[in-house]
Amino acid sequence: MNITGIITATLIVGIVGIFVGLFLGVAGLKFKVEVDEREEKVLGALPGNNCGGCGFPGCSGLASAIVKGEAPVNACPVGGESVAAAIGEIMGVEAEAGERMVAFVHCIGTCEKTHSDYEYYGEKDCAIMSFVPAGGPKSCSHGCLGYGTCVKVCPFEAISVVDGVAVVDKEKCKACNKCVDACPKHLISLIPYSAHMVVGCSSKDKGPVTMKACQAGCIGCGICVKNCPQEAVHVEDFHAVIDHEKCTGCGVCAEKCPKKCIVRA
């Protein structure tokens, strides 16, 4: 190739490059999406865990929703009051005080209290138990399997398996909801951090069936209901439910419960 050809090719490439650069620059200006500067500030105030506990796709999604007025300034369960106050200052509104929530596993059926129908030697993961006979080896089809699927998804290391049952450390829990969504038995729910008493059972079986499966299972006898001075307990689907707004933590329900399935939170 002679020198003229090289120069011509270089000029063509250069001209094309300039044209493409100008085109991209103009397109960038034309299609530029204006971002509210408050959104960046809100994103900076959020903890950055991207846990999804707020119901939005990560912290950036929540920041955008807050600026658009689609989410309250205290929507981040991980950040708590301090983050809510910081975001409220950015948005020029006062952050409402919200009740801190924590996860609780509604099962206290430890290894010594529960009965098993067979020995299971497969992979230890609660999520695959739907493919196992009776949904797992434990006689109680509602109880914690203890294989730690919730432990694996918790980004805050707030859950551990103790004697065959998942237990939440309420001081570490940030109420991100990941364990709630992951539990195939639907045993985990969010309760107020200030809750006094909780029912450590989710069985919806009738009393005789529950008693055969677990020594600590609620049999729906209603003794707790009759003895609660605050009328904070009722029986629903054969197991007791506590109204945390009414409960004062007197402990009478726990004392009277014949199966000792009501415990302090």
Image (cartoon, grey):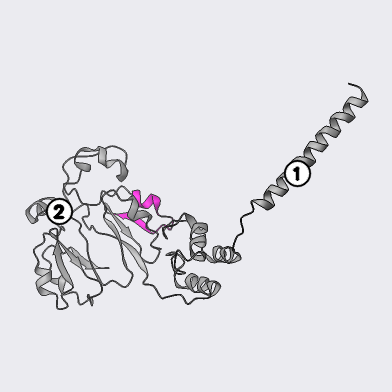
Determine the residue located farthest toward the left in the rendered image: 208
At x 24%, y 59%, the residue is 106
Whether residue 49 can be seen here: no
Residue 124, percent from left and from top = 31, 42
Q: Which residue is mark 1?
A: 21
Q: Give the image quarter of residue 260.
A: bottom left
Residue 182, percent from left and from top = 34, 50
Tell me if 228 is positioned left or right of 127 in this view.
left
Whether residue 152 is in magenta: the answer is yes
Q: Which residue is mark 2?
A: 214
Whether residue 205 can be seen here: yes
Residue 188, percent from left and from top = 29, 57
At x 85%, y 32%, the residue is 10
- Please report the bounds of the magenta region as a residue range: 149-162
Residue 134, percent from left and from top = 19, 41
What amino acid is found at the position of numbered circle 2 in the picture?
Cys
What amino acid is found at the position of numbered circle 1 in the picture?
Gly
Crowd class of label 1 (few under 14; some 14 to 19; many from 20; radius 10 Å): few
Tell me if 106 is positioned left or right of 63 in this view.
left
Q: Quadrant of the C terminus?
A: bottom left
Q: Secondary structure at mark 2?
A: loop
- Along the viewing direction, whichever of 157 and 75 lies nearer the viewer: 75
Whether residue 186 is in magenta: the answer is no
Mark 2 or 1, closer to the camera: 1
Q: Quadrant of the N terminus?
A: top right
The relative height of residue 21 versus residue 51 in the rendered view (above or below) is above
